[in-house]
Amino acid sequence: MDQKWIQMLVILVFYQIMASGAGELVVKEGAKVDIECKPAEMFNTVIWFRVLDNSGMEFIASFGRDGKMKSNPSPLSPYIDSSKVDKHILTLKSFSKARDSGTYSCTIIQSNEMKFGKVTRLIGEKKVEVTTRAPRVIASTRSPSLTTSACVCKGNTNTGETSSIIPCSTIILGPLAGGCGLLLLLLLITLLYCNHIRTRRCPHHHRRKPRTMAPGKQMKNNTHV
């Protein structure tokens, strides 16, 4: 039978089997995978094939009952190991999700009848994407702290004298005392000035009233006149 017709028959029958369900196997990238497929009856030749998710049906190879490879139109893929095919196992050396994802099975042809073995679907493991967020920058509203250094005055360095704290205190207290004295002087001047203005505006408050003399003294004064 022509190989194209064989492929068409395989596709038609194979998709009927797929409708009833197939065993799925999730595989990590680069992992080694053993695919088992044993026909239900005795056979002289078994045909291995796969239907890939990206490129459709692909003929793998045909083997005899003893595991020896039959004459194939194309050489066996370097990613496939057939050393255990006599035990009905075909091995993928290094699984690639883009290259090897799909459905694998085997079939035999007896009396113009195709009989399929176990169907296995290989699915590549999904990569877990880790998203990282940039850290939030919180602007500080605190005012910068001011550090004040202690007052250091250059005084006499002779031993036995008082420490430099006393000259510092006199330097600080001297201007304060002078300022307080100046404020007190200004207050006194202001009070005197206000009192002077008050006497000028209201002179009747400061006039002396004439004294009332007794009648006897008044008569005596009149006699002297």
Image (cartoon, grey):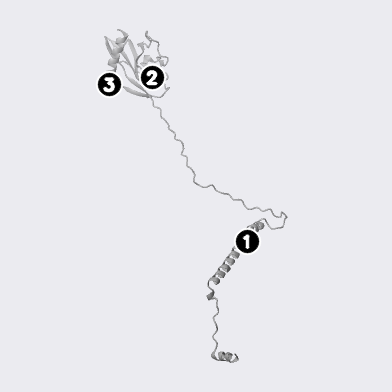
Q: Distance between the residues labelled 3 and 1?
A: 107 Å
Which numbered tag is attached to residue 178? 1
Q: Residues within 10 Å of mark 3 (few under 14, many from 20)?
A: few
Q: Residues within 10 Å of mark 1 (few under 14, many from 20)?
A: few
Q: Which of marks 3 and 1 is in front?
A: 1
Q: Distance between the residues labelled 3 and 2?
A: 21 Å
Quadrant of the rendered image containing residue 155: bottom right
Judge by depth and name the residue closer to the eye, 165 or 39.
165
Which numbered tag is attached to residue 100? 2
Query: Which residue is rendered at x = 34% and y = 21% of the image?
Result: 121
Residue 111 position, x and y percent, is 26, 9
Quadrant of the rendered image containing residue 48: top left
Which numbered tag is attached to residue 68? none
Judge by depth and name the residue closer to the eye, 141 or 193.
193
Find disc 3 in the rendering and name its residue. 19
Three-letter code for the amino acid on which mark 3 is drawn: Ala
Judge by depth and name the residue closer to the eye, 56 or 142.
142
Q: Classify mark 2: helix, strand or loop.
A: helix
Q: Is residue 210 above or below residue 223?
A: above
Do the residues bearing badges 1 and 2 touch, measured as CB atoms within 8 Å? Answer: no
Outermost residue on the right side: it is: 158
Three-letter code for the amino acid on which mark 1 is drawn: Gly
Q: Classify mark 3: helix, strand or loop.
A: helix
Q: In this view, does 212 lie above or below 173?
A: below
Three-letter code for the amino acid on which mark 2 is drawn: Asp
Instruction: Please report whichever mark, 3 or 2, sits nearer to the chain's N-terminal start.
Output: 3
Q: Is residue 181 above or below residue 205?
A: above
Tell me if I can see residue 167 in this picture: yes
